[in-house]
Image: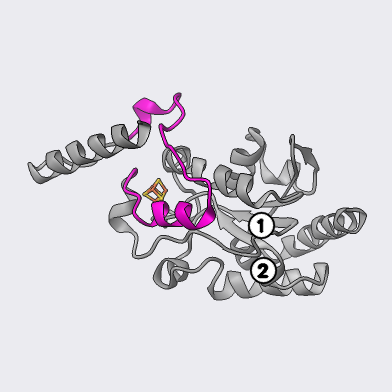
Amino acid sequence: MKNLKNALLLRQLYQLKQLGYKYTSVNIFKEDEPDLTLPNTLETLEKQAKECHLCELSKSRNKVVFGEGSLTATLMLVGDTPSVSDDSAGKIFTGRAGDLLTKMLENVLGLSRDDVYLANILKCRALDTQSPSPTYAHTCHPYILKQIELISPKIIIAFGDLAYQYLSNDDSAMDDVHGTIVEKENYIVIPTYHPNYLLRNPSAKKEVFEDLKKVKVLLEKL
Ligand code: SF4
């Protein structure tokens, strides 16, 4: 029933768009949870995300970057928004930040990208990748929550402020919270700096190394 309601609403929005109306900010809905009915398999969830037009990022994206990796991963890595190269390739954590992430996984945790599941809060690239609008994140975050539910990881590394805030409900600065263990009902969240941040601030690599060592210890105890 909700799907039908959403489909009718979308059809009305498309009709309004054809009449010349423009997309508008969804700030007015900020206090409400997005009315999204999401499927219960990753395959259909990905299909729905790839056809999603719930926020205006759908207008500027080239490709939806849904996420990838092991569907039975114990460890999930969650970032904020696709990069320019992710948006072109339709793949997550590509380019220099992706290379750095792959090296950190291999060198500190002894894992490959295929051993973990990678996803972002936003599935479409935000134009301001360093500080994506919380409005878009609010609209999109049911997708990441559903991915977490379906993958069912034990540990999630939250890369950067946006990922941490949406996974922990805490808006503390990363400088204050990186490496802390946040217990959720079915998993643990550990925040640390985003690989993109490390490219701009290489001195923070030491902190990330220490945070990942904590993750390694936790993984060994599982
Ligand atoms: S960012 Fe998320 S909510 Fe916005 S259009 Fe893309 S998938 Fe849909």
**Residue pushed farthest front?**
1
Q: Are marks 1 and 2 in contact (CB under 8 Å)?
A: yes
Q: Which mark is residue 131?
A: none
- From this view, report whether residue 61 is shown above or below residue 149: below
**Considering only order in the chain, which callout, 2 or 1, is on the residue closer to the N terminus?**
1
Residue located 46% across and 61% down the image: 65
Residue located 43% across and 33% down the image: 34
Indicate whether residue 56 is drawn in magenta.
Answer: no
Q: Position of residue 18 (x, y in %)?
A: 10, 45
SS assignment at label 2: helix
Q: Position of residue 133 (x, y in %)?
A: 44, 43
Q: Nearer the viewer, residue 101 or 203?
A: 101
- From this view, report whether residue 43 is shown above or below residue 34: below
- From this view, report whether residue 205 is shown above or below residue 14: below
Point out the frontmost of discs 1 and 2: 1
Instruction: Please give the range of residues in magenta.
Output: 26-55
Q: Quadrant of residue 177?
A: top right
Q: Nearer the viewer, residue 79 or 172?
A: 79
Of the residues shown, which amino acid type is indicated by label 2?
A: Leu
Q: Position of residue 68 (x, y in %)?
A: 57, 64
Q: Quadrant of residue 196?
A: bottom right
> What residue is disc 2 on?
101
Q: Tell me if mark 1 has few (under 14), some (14-19) or many (20+) residues whose alpha carbon lies within 10 angstroms of its own.
A: many
> What residue is disc 1 on?
77
Would residue 201 appear left or right of 68 to someone viewing this image? right
Residue located 42% across and 42% down the image: 136
